[in-house]
Amino acid sequence: MKVGIPKEIKTLEGRVALIPAAAGYLVGQGHEVFVETDAGRLSGFSDDQYRAVGVQVLVDAGAVYEAAQLIVKVKEPQPVEVAMLREDHLLFSFLHLAAATGLMQDLLDVGLTAVAFETVETDSGQLPLLAPMSDIAGRLSVQIGAHLLHQPQGGKGILLGGLPAAERGHVVVLGAGVAGGNAAAMAAGMGAQVTVFDNNRDKLARMRALGNNVTGLHPYPETLHEAAVNADLLVGAILVTGERASHLISAKTVAEMENGSVIIDISVDQGGCIQTTRPTDYTNPTFIHEGVVHFGVTNMPGAVPRTASQALSAVLTPYIACLAQPEWGQNKELLRGINVKGGKIVHHALQDLLI
């Protein structure tokens, strides 16, 4: 199989789909691997490191798309990349099509097969390719949120962990999955007062086990409203595989939050779980609505590309090795990950979105 790794072009996206060691593994398995020049530079990997493991470094994206059968990238194709896709391409990347129906239509028009990282699913319902990026996004949400709470950033001017003679900050997390759990753990470790909402009692028990400063609650609407209104930092981390996120926090609730409070909606790439959220990027990551600082960057892990690329490559490599085989369609986890194929919508979560 001919595997192509283009350089990411989404705004300030520094990740690369495969680090040299992972690409070299595929070469060792007998595959041809092509990488666009400088694709790994922002992650700290040079073209020479790719060449040293047998990868062919090509001059531009056009050459990579032309040479490859399997296109492996991190973020969803941008318009200029869609124009380089062919019907015979197999695309493997994050897609988040529930919140990007225009891109979904473009991929249907191309007629290729597209497998989304975020919908590759195990028999037990785990999302192995999304998990490491959710780890990172959850941790970043609290690091970034703590910074945005600083007065020069527009925040209310508090230290999340507090200190003697000063109260702790209050962090509210919507969802106790991988992203939400990491956010809660980070906030608890910083000494904040943390409230986590989830429908799953076992997850709430794990959140309580983080420390005496963590409370796990069922998301009754009135309880959600009260907690959000009193939050210093509100983190949205809701996910239903492949589906657009539901709004758990209304614009009315946001309007009642104190000026200088901060919202970070990790769910923004699936549409966001807070009504006032809208997508942003790292050039202009925040906006203020009703006095509340909103952070809606859709590629949060792109801020730590070396860490993210290493973590992503580790989980991607065995799946790419499988996709590179003619019988990859026998892999149930990858089959669940197919979003579109041959001009048709395949994933059940997307089938009603273009009606």
Image (cartoon, grey):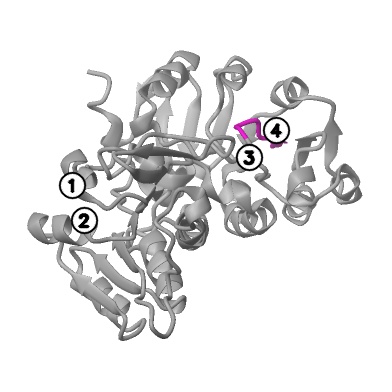
Secondary structure, magenta segment, majority class: loop
Residue 102 at x, y = what percent?
Answer: 40, 19
Q: Which disc, if any, is residue 13?
A: 3
The mark that comes first in sequence, 3 or 2, is 3
Q: Nearer the viewer, mark 3 or mark 4?
A: 3
Residue under circle 2? 229
> Whole-Å distance between the Cαs marked 4 and 1?
42 Å
Residue under circle 1? 253
Q: Which disc, if any, is residue 6?
A: 4
In the depicted view, which residue is nearer to us: 269 or 290?
Answer: 290
Q: Secondary structure at mark 2?
A: helix
Label 4 neighbour load within 10 Å: few <14, some 14-19, many 20+: many
Q: Nearer the viewer, mark 4 or mark 2?
A: 2
Query: Which amino acid, by three-letter code, is at mark 1?
Result: Thr
The mark that comes first in sequence, 4 or 2, is 4
Residue 228 in the figure: left or right of residue 169: left
Q: Quadrant of the N terminus?
A: top right
In the depicted view, which residue is nearer to us: 160 or 237?
Answer: 160
Query: Which amino acid, by three-letter code, is at mark 2?
Result: Val
> Whole-Å distance between the Cαs marked 1 and 3?
32 Å
Residues marked 2 and 1 touching at CB (< 8 Å): yes
Residue 107 in the figure: left or right of residue 282: left
Magenta segment = 1-11
Is 168 drawn above or below residue 332 in the view shown?
below
- Report the residue at 40% width, 49% height from top: 266
The mark that comes first in sequence, 4 or 1, is 4
Inspect the magenta stretch and tell me whether residue 268 lies in it.
Answer: no
Residue 45 in the figure: left or right of residue 241: right
Query: Which amino acid, by three-letter code, is at mark 4?
Result: Pro
Residue 299 at x, y = what percent?
Answer: 52, 43
